[in-house]
Every structure is written in C-alpha cells, then in structure tokens.
Amino acid sequence: MNKYLFYPGCSMEGSARAYYESLKAIQPPLALELEEIEDWNCCGATEYLSINLIPAYSLIARNLALAAQQKNGTDTVMAPCSACYLNLEKADYYMAERPALGEKVNEALAAGGLHYDPGTLQIRHLVDVIINDIGLETVKSKVVRPLTGLRVAPYLGCMVPRPDFAKRWSDHEHPSELDDLMKALGAEVIDFPMKTSCCGGHMTQIGPETAYELIRRLVAAAEEHQADIMVTMCPMCQMNLDAYQGETNRHFGTNYHMPIVFFTQLMAVAFGIDPKQAGFGLELVSAKEALARIGLNVPEEAKPAAPRRKPEGLPMPKPLPKKYASGQAVAEE
Amino acid sequence: MSEKKPKIGVYVCHCGSNIAGMVDVEAVRDWAQAALGQDGVVVSRDYKFMCSSLGQELIEKDIQELGLERVVVAACSPHLHEKTFRTASERAGLNPYLTELVSIREQVSWVHTDKQVATEKSKALVSGAVHRVAYNTELQPLKVPINPNTLVVGGGIAGIQAALEIANAGFHVYLVEREPSIGGHMAQFDKTFPTLDCSACILTPRMVEAGTHPNITLLTWSEVISVSGYVGNFNVTIKKKARYVNEELCTGCGICVEKCPQKVIDDVYEAGLGYRKVIYTPFAQAVPKYPVLDRPNCTFFKNGKCKACEKFCPTNAIDFTQEDQYLNVEVGNIILATGYDLFDARRVTNYGYGRLPNVFTSLEFERMSNAAGPTGGEITLRDGKTKPETVGIIHCVGSRDKNFNNYCSSICCMQSLKFAHLVKERTGATVYEFYIDMRTPMKAYDEFYQRVLEEGTLFVRGKVAEVTNATHGPHEKGKLIIQVEDTLVGKQRRIPVDMVILSVGMEPRHDAKQVGQMFGISCSSDGWYIERHPKLDPVTTMTEGILIAGCASGPKDIPASVAQGAAAAARVLDKILQKEVELEPIRATVDESKCSGCRICNNLCPFNAISFLDDVGVTRINPALCQGCGTCVAACPAGAISGTGFSNEQIFAQIEGLLMGV
Amino acid sequence: MSEKPKFAMYWAASCGGCEISVLNIGEKILDVDAHFEPVFWPVAVDSKYKDVEAMEDGSILLTLWNGGIRNQENEHIAHLLRRKSKILVAFGSCATEGCVPGLANLYPVEEIFSTAYHTVSTDNPQGIHPQPVVQVPEGTLTIPAMNPVLKTLAQVVDVDYFMPGCPPEPHQIAAVIDLVIAVLEGKAQLPPKGAVIGAGNSTVCDECPRARNVKHITAFKRIQDVAPLDPTLCILEQGVPCNGPATRSGCNARCPRVGAQCIGCYGPAEGVLDYGARLITAFASVVDAKEPEEIEAILDGIPDPVGQFYRFNLADSLLRAGVPAWKKNGH
Amino acid sequence: MTDSFEPVIVGFTCNWCSYRAADAAGTARMKYAPNVRLIRLMCSGRLDPTFVMKALASGADGVLITGCHPGDCHYIDQNYKALRRFLLLRRTLKGLGVEPERIKLVWASAAEGLKLTNEINAFVEEIRALGPLHWPKWDSNGHTAEKQPILEVTA
Amino acid sequence: MAAAETVLTQGAGLKKPEDLTLLREVAEATAGVSHLEMCIQCGTCGGSCPSAADMDHTPRALFAMLRAGMREEVLRSNTPWICVSCYHCVVRCPQEVHIADVMYTLKSMAIKAKKYTDSKPPDFSQTFVGMVETFGRSFELGLATRFYLTHQPLRLPGMAGMGLGMLTKKRMNLAPTRIKNIEQLKAILEKAKTLELTA
C-alpha cells in the first residue's frame, strides 16, 4: 500500500471534477492510499504571488505546516494539480534557499500557532507517484481494456516539469513520464512537440487574445499530429483547452474539435472502469468519438442548452459583501 | 623553552604597493624587532621589492655579516618565491631549509580591506613563522636519477607534437593511444580555421613521422592501467588490447577490410554519421596502418562462422587467438595529452538533437563536409540527398550555461564561422549564425569573421531558445523553426530553416577524473586538469613529473594545443638533461626505540613506503617511496614517527607564534 | 654508623593504592629501611606537619608524593615538602597526570558537592553540606577548602621526577629504589631532572605478547561483547578499544596479558603533548570506512570518548576540560 | 557578549589544494574576513588532533581544517584519514566542554578560492555567534584570573 | 560602492537620472536567490516566451532597463502581467536567473506604486486573493462573474455558453467552500502583511 498526504486543491471539487472522480476510481486497483490534509487552504495559484510576497508564501506554508503536523506514517504530500504542486514545492524550496523568507513566513505562521521547517516534507505530483512508487509494471498489470489504436497527445503543461526544484522529472522540455504511462495503457502515443508548452494560464481571464493564440497552437499541433485526444495532468490546462476551445474557434474562425481529458480518466477506462465513473462526459469538447475508437460509449450528460433570451444567461450571484457573517453564504461540503 | 634561540632575521616586503597599500610594512618591521627580540629576532628590515636582486642581497649580506641562523621573509605566497629566497640564503651559506616565507600578500593585503586589521594579521603571521623557523632543521634535498624515457598519453595533435619534439632530441618516447589510430579529433576535421587548410594534409605528415620515428614506440589500441613511482622513476603498466591482427605480418593492404561482410555504424571517427566494417582502419591515413577487429560485432566471435578476413589475408596476419597484452615500461616523465570529449547535444533537449533529424552537431557537420566522409563532402539533410536552402548555426551549445558547462569552449565561434563559410561555398544556402557574443581574439581570426560577414551570413545576436517542429502556421510547415529573441531588435523571431548545426562545446574526457587519480593529478570544478600555474606554468601539474598538454587542461584550438605539446616536451627535456631531480626532503622517519610495533600506521601509506619488520617488531619507512604527506606522523600513538619540514615542534611553535598576544 | 638519608612519602588526593603498591615490593622494603630513615610517612610513621615544618630546608633526600592537588591542604603540603626535599618524585598517576580524581575537572566544584551530598545515592537525611568554616559552640572549625580544579603536582610545584602508573608496578618501584641506593653508593648517576622513571620509553604494545597485524577496524565493541576474546591476537584488532598503543610501557602489559584492554594508566609515551589526542588519531586511523555516515556509525562504538581517552590524563591534557563553555555563556 | 568580539581562528591548509585556493582567492582579490590565520601542512592527513587542541588551548576560538575533496587527495586518499580523525576529535571535544561547532572541516580544491572564502566568512560568523572560548578559572584562591596561559606542558 | 549608488548620473539618452539601486531592490524583494545581477542579456528568456509577442519589452530588455534604473518605464511595462509563469525561460536561462519570480516581484511593486497601465490583471489577482482570504478556498464562479462584470461585460455574451456548460456539468460550484479554521488563516495573513522580505 502506497500512502500519501493528499492536497487536492480547489479545482478538484469544481472545474476538475473529472480528475477527482477518476482519481478516486483508480485508487483501489493501484492500492493508493490518500489522507487528505485536514483543513487545507487554497495555494493562491499564480495570483497571490503577484500581490504580496510574504502573505502569498504564508498562505502556502500553512498547508505545509498542517501536513507536517499530520504526518501519519508518511512525509510525502501528493498534489494532483500542477499549480498547487509547484506552489507547495516552491515554498518548501525557497524557504530553505532564502532563510530570510523562511523566518518571515514562520513569523507569520506563528500568529496561527503553526511552524514549518523547510525540507520536512517531500512534495510530489500524482504522475511521479504512480510511475516511481507504484510502477508501470503494476499499472500494466491492471489494464483490462488496453487503449489500442487510440492516438494520444500527452500534454503535461508547464508547472510540473518546470522549474522542478527537486529534480524529479526526466526533462524540462520533453519529459517522457506521461508518454510512458500512456504507453503502459496500450495507447498509441504521438511525439507531441508542444507537450510542455503553455496553455495560457490565467490569461484566459485577463488577456484572452494572448491565451487564445496559445490554445490554438496546442490544439492545432495535436490535430496536425492526428491525435484523437489530448491527455493532461493539470486542471488549468484542461480547463483552458476544453472550456475555451469554443471561444478560440470563434476568435480565429476555426473549427477545431480536440477533446482533452485527465490521464487518470484514461487509466480508469483502461482498468475497466465505467467511463461515466471516470468522469467522462464532463468535458465540454466531447471525447465521445475518441472513446468510440476503443469501443466505448459514453453516456451523454445533459447538453448545455443554448443561451436563452438574454445573453446574460448565467445565473448571477450577488457581488461579494464587504464582510461575511460566518457560515451564511457558505455551502457545507 | 630554555635553549638558546637561533639568530633570526625578518624581512618584510612592500611588493610595491601590493602589500604596502594595505599593510603598514614599517609597523610590522618595527614590531618584529621589538616584540620578537626575545624569540631570537636580531634584525628586521623592509624593502620595496624583496625578490629583486637588491632585496636578496640585503638578506645575503645580513646572513654573512650578522651571522643569521634563520631567515623569515614576509612577502608573497611560498608557491611563488620560496625557492627564490631559499636560494638566496644558500648563496650566503645558510641551509635553504632554514628560511621561511610568509604570505602577507595573497593571505593579507589582497584579501582584506582594513589596514589596521591587515597589519595586525601580518604581525601574527610573521610571529608564527619566527617561532616556527627556530625549529627548522638543516635538510638536504633528495636527489634521484631521472629515467630518460617518456610516456605520452594521447595521440592527438598535442601528444604527437610532444612525442616528436622529445624523440627528435634523441630520447625515447612511448606514445599510447586508446583508439586504433593516432590523429585525434584533428583527423576528423575537414578544414581548419582561419586559414582553411585541409586538416588531413597538414596532420598526416606528423602522424607518419610519429609512426615511423626510431625513438617512438607507438602503442595504439592501448591504455595505461596503472602508474606507480615518482618523478624520474615511474613504473607504468599498459594494456595493449587485442587487435586480432599480427602487426609483424600485416602489410596494411586492406583486403580484410574489403572482404569483411559486416558493417556497423561508426560512432567514433564518423561521429555516427557513417559506417565502417567490423575489421577496420578508422580512416585512410590511419597510423599505424594495421586494422583492428571489433570483437563484439564480429560474426565469427558471435556465431563461430565467417573468418572471411582470415581467408583472404595474403600474409596470414589475422589471429583470432590473440589476447590482451600487458606491458610494463619505466619512464621518468609523463605527458598527459588526453584531449576532450564533445558535449552531448542531446542534453539540450530544447534544441531537438536526436529527436529532429535535421539537427546536426558540429562534428557531424565536419564529417559531412569532409570529402572522405560519409557524403563525400556533400552537405545534405539527414536523408542524404536534399540540399538545405536555409541553415542555422547555433553557438555556445552546452557552453557558457550554468545548466551545462559554465566555461566558454573558445573554439565554437571560429568553428561556426568556418561552417558558415563552408555551407555558403558548397550549397549557396542562406546561413544564419546565432550567437551571444562573438569571440575572435587570435591572429587572423577577426579577419575571418569579416570575411564571413562579407559573404552575406546573417548574424542574429541571441541565444536560441528552442528548435522545434511545432508550427504556428502553414508558412512554417516542414521546416525547423529556430525561436530566438533578436536582442538587437528586442523582438522574438521564429526563423524557419532546413538544417540546424549545433556548435557544441568541449568537455573534459568522461574518465578524466579516474585517469587523473591514476596519475595523481586533480581536476578543477569544471573537470579539466589543473596546471601548476595557469599563466606561468601551464603544462606542469602539482605532481612532479606529470605534465599536461592540449585540451586536457581546458578548451584550446589547434595552434594552442601544438604549442602546449612542444612546451611540455621542452620541460621534459630540461629534466632529462639534468639527469637527476631534486626532491623536497620532506619525509617521515621512525624512531625505532620508541616504536612499539603496534602497527597502527601500517595501512596508512598509499605509496607502500611503510613496512613492518617482523623480526625486530618495529615499523620502518622507505625514504625513497615516502612522499612526505605526514599522515603516519600524525597517526603514531607513541609519537615515534617524525616528519622533516613539518615537525610537531615546528607546528606547535607556529601555533603559539600565530596566537601570541591573543 | 652515619645518619641515614631521610625519606618521606605523602598521600594527597588519591585512593591509597600507591601506598599499597609500595608495600607490595615485598622484602625490598627492608632495603628501604636499611638505607633510609622515614621521617614523614603518614601511613607508616607517626609524625606531624609541624615536625616537617621544623626540619631544615632540603633535609629530606627523597620524597615520594602520591595524589593530585585537590584542596588547600594538599597544596600547602606540596609547597612544604618541596622546600624540605632534595628530590621530589611525583609518584603514581594522580600525582603525575591527575588520574581518576582529575576527571572531576569536567564539573564545577558545586556540582561535585551536590552530587556527593545531595543525590539519591547518598544517605544524608540532615542535608549536611560541608563548609570550610563552621561556627560551633566550641569555637570556629575550619577544614581545607576545595580548589576549583584538581591539579597535578607539577602544576603546583617544581618536580624532579615522574613515576607513572595506577599504581606504579612493584617491580618498577623496586628498580627505582635500587637505582637510588646505587646512586647513594656512588655506583650510578641520577637521570636528568624532569625524567620519567620507573617506566619504559615505548608503549604497552612493546611488552604485549599478542600477535599484531595491519589493522582495519569495522566496529568498536565493549570487551564483554566480544566472546570469546582471542587470547593470542591484538585486542584492538578484535574491535575493543585498547589504549596500549599510546600508553607508556613499563607495566609489562599487565592487562592485555590477562585478557583485558589497556586503559592507559601509565600515561603518554615520551615527548607526547596530549595523551588523548594520540588515541584519537590512532583509533581514527584504523577505522575502515570512507563515508561520513559509516565512520560515525563505527565511532558510535566509543560512547564516552573522554572516558576512553582521558581516564587518567584529563588534568594534564591540553584542554583540561573545565566548565563547559556553553554553560558559562548561559550565565 | 560584547559586540566587539573578533574571533581568532587558526586554519590548517593542505599545500596542494586549500593553500592554493587561498592563493587563488588572493590573486583574484576576493575579500574575506581577516580572522583566520593559516598554517600550511603538506596534507590534511598530517593534521594531528594535538594541533587543534594546542590551537584552542593557546587562545584560538575556532579551528578550520581544509583539505582536498574526497577522491582528489594529492596523496591518493589521506584526506579520508583526516575526515575520520576530525569526526572522532569533534566527539571528544564535545565531551571536553568545547562546542563541536568550533572546529570545521572544509574540502576546497586549488580552484575553489571562492568556496574557501565563503566558508571562511561563514565560519567566522558561526564562531562569532558562539562567542569566545571560555576557559576554567585556574586560580586556586578563587581569584578570577583572565585567560590563563594554558601551555604548562609536563615532560 | 556606496558613493557610486548615491550619485545619480544623467544617462545618455535617458530623460531621468538613473536609479542604480533599482536592480538590487528588485532582487531583494524576490523570493529565493534571484541571480538578477548575473543576466548576460543573451535573450533566452525573450526567445522562450510564449507570449512575448504581446509584451511591450522582452524580459531581457526589462532586465537591461532595471540595470539602467528606468523605474517608471519598468513598472509601467505590461511584460510582467503578460507572463504566463510557464517557466520555460527559468529552466533555459544560462545564468539561472529566477525570471518568473522577478516578474511576480515587479507586479507587486507596480501594484504598490499604482503604476500598471491596464487594471484588469491586478484586479483579477486581487479579486482572486479576496476570495481566498475570505473563504480559504478559491471560488471560481464568484471570481468569474465579479471580474467579468467589472472588466469585460462585453465578453459575457460569448462566454455564456461555456459558463452554462460548466454549471450544468457541475464543474462550477454555485456557492463557495470555506475552510474550518478560517480565523487561523486570517491571523496568519494579517501578520504576514506586516512583514517584508529584505536582505
């Protein structure tokens, strides 16, 4: 049994629900035990760092401090989200490299009765854990429905293989880990030249033209290499390429249709798990055709209806009040 | 310490302003006279340049007139001038080992910023030396005869040059080369910069001369496997790998090569771009001319059948029963001209070498442009046919980059310019050069740069970010895209080309460290062998009798390598002609009356100088083998081993002196 | 019959073993009596300090002093006997190098007292704590005050000869007596002042009959953990830290001969500045490991390096070990 | 602790590597703390633990020991012996009441002038933080004499 | 050294006096050891950047401007805001300059100095951070709607289909999740806001 402290990250319960569900589905066959870090908070993504350094690192370090307290037979924290993984690893690394930063962060943590000594924990990504701890042999042994004939473009995105402080990955530019994993599932893996290129990150929000071009390049390259499907390990990449592919098509007048799913989803179906349980159907660019290539039918979920009358068809919550009374507007999870 | 103090003279050097600028030299002088008088100092002087002949005469005069018994000179590092001052003392009749040099330049004035503190530290160092020198004893250098034979390791241009110089002077040389032929990297090149001489044309005569010289024993396909002994008297074991060709009988006719049915990729000479037979001479001009049989790939050795080479050999020179031979040779000096490895361009994954077919390394390009190479001198894409219309040449691949090698490989700019010229000349293609800085400092080099500019090569100042086949649109289809910031424009550019040449840097040999350890020399943090002095003594090492030449000590071009080969030879000849060498008399000795035979020290000496005499139950040290490290001296629990030059008494006294007044 | 030369022997901070050892010379004691008149020897002769004070300076030919200088009384008598004696010999390990009492130098005096009087192992229901000066109804009582540290005899007065051993071996004592008698009879010369007498020049291994080889130690063990000990092989080679290689010869390798490791009572060999340092370097030199972790693991087999290296020599060591520096800094 | 405490450190260097590293640092005019006074030995293997004790006993607040990197010893592998002695010495010093941090072993090749100066600077600060090496008060009358001459050497 | 820093030289071609402390100021305010002073202007960063086309200066040019003390121009540059944190430049930089982290520093300096020219990016960051500080978790729907309403109302029609898709597929939660010990997090962040990273 491989056991890890688990930092899911915010998107796992939202935009990357398919990732979370498929991860849960492959846990039993892989004997992967995950213990969620009690009361973890958001890592701040790439946003907090832009505002204020010490609070940004303190925000991240609160999670590390909680995890270090919780150590329950393991000192490894596994984060499936690239941005979370990078932020946790970065805080651990920089607090040691720049002792002044470590001191300040601990001064802040002390205000909450917490402390973290850099180096206490190992921060690792899910793919790393699967390949290096569980092993490709084990993965292969669990495959009952090989993905034979499915042309997969492995797309890692930026933040896992770079900057890679702990030197865990085979390469910054063309790492082989995701390729190897997909091959173990029996898929036909294309030599995807943009496998670590950028998806646009938060530029979909603040500078869409920049983002659309990056998305276009990726989708175009996948199509040029005749991929049936792209597979990723990053919620942000999946979100940008999936949810904004339509926007991108509109922007450029193109007609790309390149589904992108999480690697765990393909693992799950290869392990014989029902596609629905593996989170298929949650993608906006449907993977139906791709799955059909390996003889699978995906139950279609409710199709997004066309916007009704008014363009502002999105249900609008009220603007955030200045102060929140505790618990009022907050859902129970 | 009641014994009578010897008379000591203290001399403090200004070194112009090098010392005097940061150390109050007069204050040190006066303090030595006043405070160290009780420790035997009878005279203390300062002088502008102590190492000048006038400065030395000052010391000599005092020795003779004041009857000085010890001398302390506070100046620069002993590694620079210890010999100078010891020789001066000797001229005045004082045993040289009674003179000590204190470094108040390298260790004080050059590295500190507060004059008062620097002056105080200088006083402490002088005090240390004064206390120490009282316990110095008269020593006589050990003289050992020099074996006139020389071993040269590495048959590239530097090694060939060194071997020829020594052999021409009438002394014997063993020239050992790991590959089947001498010639080294230079034999692989087509043209040499900046003159565009044909590399083979200028190298071959030297190779032939080395191969036929009566004073040179050429041992190719051979490796040194162990070295023992010391300067003047090295004992070297050389493994002569089995060639499966009897050199006595072989005429080098080449019929065996012709008849051999098996072809393999030639990763060494052809840089993986061409093929060779299993029995082969790496190239037409190879020296020696005898082929080598590549056993792991040989059909006979694999399947027990074939022997085509044997059948067709007109002189019965093929010998499948040949085994590796081990030769023992005795030499007085060793020159390491072991050269360099090329940086493995696959490590820069963003340049795509190994993944993108039309990305080539500089050595591949050399072979391709060579008329004797795999394409007969045609410059083509990897398909072997298509001529490139646009070519990008990337500088500094693996060099000047903290992710790979920090240093500048020094030859790549010129090599890249040469490539640009050759591409233009042979294909008329559009050529881009991508550089960080152009470095063309030697004779006629910058003129060559001017010439290549004139030829219309397009220079882009920027380190290439990536070479990719991921296109941004139809206009890039089927091309390699070089993505780079044109730093002089301040914009990112994507330049589509057909062919990319990576000007890869030089690296220390992959086994440089182990080889260095075998010969007792060390590598810098970059992995190159360290010279005794980077400017003034570039071809000798810290280990007497071991010299280095060519790229073994760092990247060099051909003229520099040749100059170093000759320089190393000159240093060796100097030693040989002296017939004997003086060794520092720093040695350990055992007081047998104190030795209890506990044998603690018996496993400590890597030079086998320590032996245990079973009959009398004591340990003895062989002074000829002892190298003077002092490890056994420090180890002896009974205090029975003492070391000359660095005795306990000297060190204790130095500690006391250094800490006087603390 | 002319007056016999005067002889004295004094017992300072020591266990008394040295006195017993003198008696262990057997019939030789009669030679002592024949050639000397014991004038001050608290164990054997009833004489008082005031008797000694009354003697003429330099009137005692030979004084054997055993024990270290632990308190004011020891120090006072050391000065007194130095004045009265022609030849003052530091006799035994305590006098020459501090011996076991010297290990107390690792602790401040207050701590020694509190350990001695106020720990569970001490039956002291009234909580008595000795004071140098006490007022009682009968008047003022004084006892000698403890010095901050124990010193060797030579650290207090000028010493003529040193005789190591805990205690000195009877045959060595006998030899020294023979020598002095021979000198008295004009048949021999005294060794130069400051010499070590009654001991050899080399180390214990010189007299040890055990076979020795090139040493590669992969583990240090306690002697009881090596069973059975090879009776013919060097004890150190069997992994037991034996101080023989660094300890002065003269005992005829008494302990190793009977299967016990040398613990170093004869002190350092001739010319050695620090006894413990010799053992540190010797033991470390034969550790057979290159990686720091491996080396540390082997060194863990010497759990108390100070006890191992300085059991007898602490008070005479270069660092002498007073109050730990970090304790002082805390005050 | 007074602010003006300037540690005095004795450094033992190997003739082939660290001494030359000090030369190289000088030639390159790298600036570093002036608190270390170097003694040249032929090899770190020559370092007798007595030297360290003698230096501490004679007033040094710390001792720096430098040698060639493991595997690079000019005398093949004598620096490993230095390492072993250093480790055992450090343990012993701790028992003797000297903070083990007062001695430091640094590997520095002849090419590593910068490394040597960085190590020296760091070590000086470490010793500065530890403060002066305190010695037992020796006066038997309870007078608190200042640092005593520790060099009473018996024969 | 000190003297050189206090003397402001009138740089040729620059309208304002050079500010020679700027580079060090940026380096010190950057997490980790930035190596900013080691830049050799090779352009690897500018060449690697996937969004360089939209930047007014390449990162390399920005570093040259830092050296030249062009504070105003640097803080007004859109370059840090266009940076997508892909770390390509970071791993390729031959001098190990922590380029991405320097960009974060420049962004926070620009916010503090209120020098940014486009308010969208800093507002997005601040909205995001506001959510996190309130709930301890990010809240995608709240973030998106609030941000779009303020800055890109015209983009909303086009986005609606996507947003609806995300909602129907339950990939966006209608209400935020809040951590349990939000008070502890607030205390930590309050304290952290009083601290600054200096040498």
Image (cartoon, grey):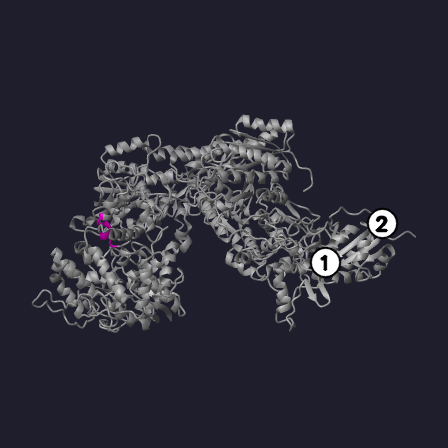
Q: Position of residue A294 (x, y in %)?
A: 22, 68
Element type at mark 1: helix
Residue at which label 1 appears: C73
Disc 1 vs disc 2: which is toward the camera? 1
How many residues crowd around disc 1 within 10 Å: few (fewer than 14), some, or many (20 or more)? some
How far across and how far down the image is residue B114, in percent?
A: 47, 39
In the displayed structure image, the side of residue C177 where residue A135 appears, left or right: left
Q: Is mark 2 on a helix, strand or loop?
A: helix
Give the labeled residue for mark 2: C184
> Mark 2 and mark 1 in contact (Cβ < 8 Å)?
no
Extreme-right residue of the structure: C1
In this rendering, the answer to whether A251 lies above or below E6 is: below
As drawn, the residue found furthest toward the left would be A309
Residue E81 magenta:
yes
Nearest to the observer: residue D147 or residue A68: D147
If the image is split into quadrants, where does the N terminus of chain A sit? bottom left
Decide which of B386, C109 is in the foreground and name it.
C109
Which stretch is magenta?
A: E76-84
Which one is nearer the viewer's eye here, A29 or E84?
A: E84
Let me know if marks 1 and 2 both belong to one chain.
Answer: yes
Note whether B442 is above or below B628 in the view shown.
above
Residue D4, labelled with which disc? none
Q: Please check the rendered image and state whether residue B30 is part of the magenta-colored stretch, yes or no.
A: no
Q: Position of residue B304 (x, y in %)?
A: 42, 55
Q: Which chain carries label 2?
A: C
Q: In this view, does B610 lie to the left or right of E2?
A: right
Q: Is residue A192 left or right of residue C150?
A: left
- Can residue A148 be seen here? yes
Residue C149 found in image quarter: bottom right
**Amino acid type of disc 2?**
Leu
